Image (spheres, rainbow, N blue to C red):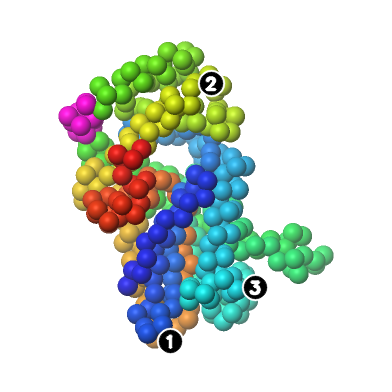
C-alpha cells in the first residue's frame, strides 16, 4: 500500500517521497521512490509553454544548489538508512545491516541490484542527483587508502539519464513536449481566470517593468512572468545572471507570489486532466512498488528498494496533479504550497 506521501523541504529543494510498507502487524519499509527537484541554479529563461533553449545541459547548478541537495540527502540518510535513527520508526531501508554502496555481497547493503537513480539530461538535475547521493551515502574514511577506492572515501553511485536526449525524455520532462498540454495552456491563457489576474496584477508588473533596465529580453506580460521573477530572484539570492536593481522587498514579494500562482496554476490537474505529464512517472512508481511487494512475497531480497528521480518542480506538480491532490481539501491543507491562492 502507499503508506505515506510527504514533502521534505531544504532551502529551495523539494522532494516528493512515495513510501511502500508491507501490511503486517509491525510494517517494515520495502521501498522509497524519491522525486527530487534540482537545487538552486543560474537564471533560466523559458517560454510561457515551459520550453527552454536547445543548449546541451541547460543552465548549471550553483554551489548553493549542491549544498541544498546534499542536505536533503543527509536528511534521507538519517531517516531511512542510519541505523541509530531509522529504527525508531521502523523505517530502515537497508538489508543485511550494511548501509554502504558498492563492493558488498549481492543482497546486502546498497548496489545496482537494489538502487536505481535516474535524472533528466540537464546539468542542474544531474549535478543535483550527485550532490544528493553524496548525502545519502556519506564518505567512509576507512575506505581512503593508497590502493583502492577514492582518496576521499566517497561512495560513487551511478546516475542514469532517463532518456538518451532531452527530446526523448517523456518520463521526467513530458511537460516540455506534449502538444495536448500546450493546447490546454493556450486555452487557459485566454480564460476569464487568467484575464482577471492580468488586470489584478497590471499595476505591480508595470512598477517592476519601470524599474528594470531595458535590453534584458524580459517580457512583462503575465504568461511570461516567471522569467521576470527568476531574473530578480537569482540575482538577489546568489548574485548570478543579469544585474538587477534593488527593488523594495514588498514589491519583490508581490512578484514572487504572482510567479508562484502562475507556475502552480500551470501544473494544476485542470491543465492536465488526463495525467499525460505525471502519469508516466506515477505508473513507473507503481510498477516498482508492485515488483517490491511480489519479491518480498517470494522471499527474494533482490529488488529495487531505493529509487530516485532527479528532476524539476514541474514533474513534481505533474505527479501531484495525476494523483488529483491539488483538488483534495485535506491535501491542500497539509501542503499549503500546493494551493495557488497561498502564493
Residue 4 lies, in percent from the top left, at 37, 65
Residue 246, disc:
2
Q: Which residues are magenta?
A: 186-196
Q: Residue at x 36, y 20 (%)?
A: 205
- Real-space Cα separation, disc 2 to disc 3, in angstroms: 52 Å
**Looking at the image, is mark 2 or mark 1 earlier in the sequence?**
2
Q: Is residue 84 above or below residue 24?
A: above
Residue 282: percent from left, percent from top: 33, 59
x 56%, y 64%: residue: 77
**In this rendering, which labeled residue sits more in front, label 3 or label 1?**
1
Pointer 2 with pointer 1, Cβ within 8 A: no
Q: Quadrant of the N terminus?
A: bottom left
Quickly name the residue at label 1: 299
Q: Label 3 vs label 1: CA separation?
A: 23 Å
Residue at position x 48%, y 51% in the image: 9
The image quarter containing residue 227 is: top left
Residue designated by label 3:
103
* Dot 3 alpha-carbon crowd within 10 angstroms: few under 14, some 14 to 19, many 20 or more: few
- Res 48 → quadrant: top left
Q: Is residue 190 above or below residue 26?
A: above
Amino acid at each position: 500500500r502507499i503508506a505515506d506521501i510527504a514533502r521534505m523541504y531544504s532551502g529551495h529543494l523539494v522532494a516528493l517521497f512515495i513510501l511502500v510498507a508491507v501490511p503486517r502487524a509491525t510494517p517494515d519499509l520495502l521501498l522509497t521512490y524519491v522525486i527530487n527537484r534540482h537545487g538552486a541554479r543560474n537564471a533560466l529563461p523559458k517560454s510561457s509553454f515551459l520550453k527552454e533553449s536547445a543548449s546541451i545541459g541547460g543552465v548549471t547548478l550553483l554551489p548553493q544548489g549542491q549544498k541544498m541537495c546534499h542536505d536533503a540527502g543527509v536528511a534521507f540518510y538519517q531517516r531511512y538508512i542510519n541505523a541509530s535513527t531509522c529504527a525508531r520508526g521502523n523505517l530502515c531501508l537497508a538489508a543485511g545491516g550494511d548501509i554502504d554502496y558498492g563492493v558488498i555481497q549481492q543482497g546486502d547493503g546498497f548496489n545496482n541490484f537494489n538502487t536505481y537513480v535516474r535524472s533528466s539530461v540537464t546539468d542542474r538535475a544531474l549535478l543535483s542527483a550527485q550532490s544528493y547521493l553524496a548525502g545519502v551515502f556519506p564518505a567512509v574514511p576507512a575506505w581512503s587508502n593508497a590502493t583502492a577506492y577514492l582518496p576521499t572515501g566517497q561512495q560513487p553511485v551511478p546516475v542514469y539519464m532517463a532518456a538518451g536526449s532531452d527530446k526523448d525524455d517523456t518520463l521526467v520532462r513530458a511537460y516540455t513536449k506534449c502538444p495536448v498540454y500546450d493546447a490546454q495552456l493556450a486555452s487557459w491563457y485566454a480564460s476569464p481566470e487568467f484575464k482577471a489576474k492580468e488586470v489584478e496584477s497590471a499595476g505591480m508588473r508595470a512598477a517592476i517593468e519601470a524599474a528594470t533596465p531595458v535590453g534584458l529580453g524580459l517580457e512583462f506580460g503575465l504568461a511570461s512572468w516567471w522569467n521576470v521573477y527568476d531574473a530578480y530572484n537569482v540575482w538577489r539570492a546568489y548574485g548570478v545572471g543579469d544585474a538587477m536593481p534593488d527593488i523594495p522587498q514588498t514589491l519583490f514579494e508581490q512578484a514572487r507570489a504572482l510567479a508562484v500562482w502562475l507556475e502552480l496554476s500551470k501544473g494544476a490537474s485542470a491543465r492536465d486532466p488526463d495525467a499525460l505529464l505525471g502519469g508516466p512517472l506515477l505508473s513507473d512508481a507503481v510498477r516498482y512498488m508492485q515488483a517490491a511487494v511480489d519479491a518480498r512475497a517470494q522471499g527474494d531480497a533482490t529488488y529495487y528498494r531505493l529509487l530516485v528521480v532527479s528532476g524539476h518542480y514541474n514533474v513534481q506538480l505533474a505527479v501531484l496533479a495525476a494523483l488529483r491532490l491539488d483538488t483534495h481539501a485535506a491535501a491542500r491543507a497539509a501542503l499549503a504550497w500546493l494551493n495557488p491562492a497561498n502564493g
